[in-house]
Image (spheres, helix red, strand yellow):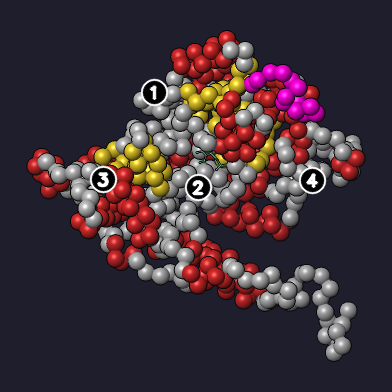
Amino acid sequence: MTDGNSKPVNSTLDPADWKAVRTLGHRMLDDMFDYLEHIRQRPVWQPIPDRVRKEFREVLPADPTDMAAVYEDFKQQILPFTVGNAHPGFLGWVHGGGSVPGMLAEMLAGGLNANCGGRDHVPIEVERQITEWARQMFGFPEGASGVFLTGTSMANFVAVLIARRAALGGTVRTQGVAPCGKRLVAYTSAAAHGCISKAMDMSGLGTAALRKIPTDRMHRMRIPELRSAIAADRDAGLTPFLIAGTAGTVDIGAIDDLSGLADLAAEEGLRFHVDGAFGALAILAPNLAPRLRGIERADSVGFDFHKWGQVPYDAGFLLVRDGTQHLETFSAPAAYLQRESRGTAGGSPWPCDFGPDLSRGFRALKTWFTLKVYGTSQLGTTISRTCELAQYLKSRVEQTPELELAAPVNLNIVCFRFRSASSDLVNAQIVVDLQESGIAVPSTTVIDGRLAIRAAIVNHRTQSCDLDRLLAATVELGRQICETTAASPIPLQEADLAETRSRDGLGEAASDFSSCVPPYAIEEQRHPYNQL
Ligand SMILES: Cc1ncc(COP(=O)(O)O)c(C=O)c1O
């Protein structure tokens, strides 16, 4: 086809000039390598200027824009203003750092544009391979099934639906919950993630049908209380159906007594699901794996490759012991999804038979790359190391008189506070100031009714120097806040001060870790990084 001037006109969306696009694409790739290689020199996070926010209030574009110009917008307005979880100083919530193989695999997956809902193609074999690897990781039997989902929130939801169908039979899929005449009740700990409540809500069982069992001093579900709650519910004519244990609570990384929960579930005839969003992958670290004992007896385990597995977002996964029950919960024949024994429509059952999604991307590829490139040994070592760093941070907090630990350190999460008579106010402000300084991004949580600074070390790039900066800045900001507001620090005892004076740099626990960057200074970090 030509235009009036007999210039070739591109009738597809493919580039008219492949050479130019190739050059641009290579530049993008190089820029992302530079970005990751030098990420430590950037602020972890920075506030979004109004002018940038306004750029994303444009009207729907009717006319084309040159891709190089769109990329320029990306560099100026998107790249500098991400949440920062690729940065080693990101310690908030539970965010993975991603990895270079995962990033490259995302590009390859984008090129293939595979739809992994179904049909007979190798991208689905890759997903089956990951299911098999997950089965081996957790010691599940042959016949186990698995499915990629956005994250563990969805994995927990799917697990509740499987348990619901197992408890109420196939009619629940056609008639809904009410005609079954049973009121199902599930159990989890008071420290469990809120998505379990959401799963109960979305499955039509209701959040009130979830019992949140109190926890012990280490934030683990109390099994005697769980046993009593089940008995009380049976006495009240309700139908207990599911125990959802947690491997790595979101607040402090506590691991429930999974063997004890598996025993009780077996005794009571209940299903046993484990929310292992980040903690389940501790199975890859030989020194941590014993703490997950009992997980191999679960009916299902939900976890995220995008957290401790360092696979780029998103890569949630649900592993199910009984693949038939899994299939029976979701498979739904449709004429337009007819299966064949040969041809493109072969290879049934398909991933769409194991979850709510029909169109699905190729999440398995970035996971396959990450697992192959690093092997479970290297990933396990990284996971172990984040826990060692948490112990290092814990000991630094203990050695710093202005700070106090707020909770036991189980795995990779450290909760602490700057000591102040106005603790909640001061610590909340410290966290916001830290985030805005660009030095570190911790988050907050509430422990025993009091706000705490929460540092979750998930990112493989984090080193002891990032934690040193976090603490130095916390103390400095805490002092500044107390000086400039009515808040007062807790006065230090003479003994504490003597300890501060005699402290030589990082203290004893530092000996395992080498410092990686020059000492931090708050002001130095406050600079705009608007360019790549
Ligand atoms: C224990 C736990 N469960 C579930 C979730 C939710 O996982 P996702 O964010 O992948 O949906 C999280 C997230 O941090 C978590 O820590």
Q: Is residue 124 above or below residue 326?
A: below
Q: Is residue 390 left or right of residue 147?
A: left
**Which of 418 and 76 lies nearest the eye of the viewer?**
418
The residue mark sitting in front, 4 or 3, is 3
The x, y position of residue 93, in whole percent, is 45, 45
Question: In which quadrant of the rendered view does residue 47 lie?
Answer: bottom left
Q: Give me the disc on residue 195.
A: none
**Which of 147 and 357 lies nearest the eye of the viewer?**
357
- Is there CB contact under 8 Å for labels 2 and 3? no
The x, y position of residue 491, in whole percent, is 15, 44
Q: CA distance from mark 3 to mark 1?
A: 27 Å
Q: Earlier in the sequence, mark 4 or mark 2?
A: 2
Q: Quadrant of the N terminus?
A: bottom right
Query: Is residue 173 found inside the magenta-colored segment of the image?
Result: yes
Give the residue type at disc 3: Ser
Q: Residue at x 40, y 62 (%)?
A: 43
Q: Residue at x 72, y 37 (%)?
A: 355
**Disc 3 target residue:** 422
Q: Which residues are magenta?
A: 172-184
Give the residue type at disc 1: Asp
Q: CA distance from mark 2 to mark 1?
A: 28 Å
Beta carbon of the mark 2 residue lies under 8 A of ligand 1: no
**Disc 1 target residue:** 216
The residue mark sitting in front, 3 or 1, is 3
- Is there CB contact under 8 Å for labels 4 and 2? no
**Disc 2 target residue:** 96
Q: CA distance from mark 4 to mark 2?
A: 29 Å
Q: Is residue 16 left or right of residue 185?
A: right
Q: Earlier in the sequence, mark 2 or mark 3?
A: 2
Q: Is residue 500 above or below residue 167?
A: below
Q: CA distance from mark 4 to mark 3?
A: 60 Å
Q: CA distance from mark 2 to mark 3?
A: 32 Å
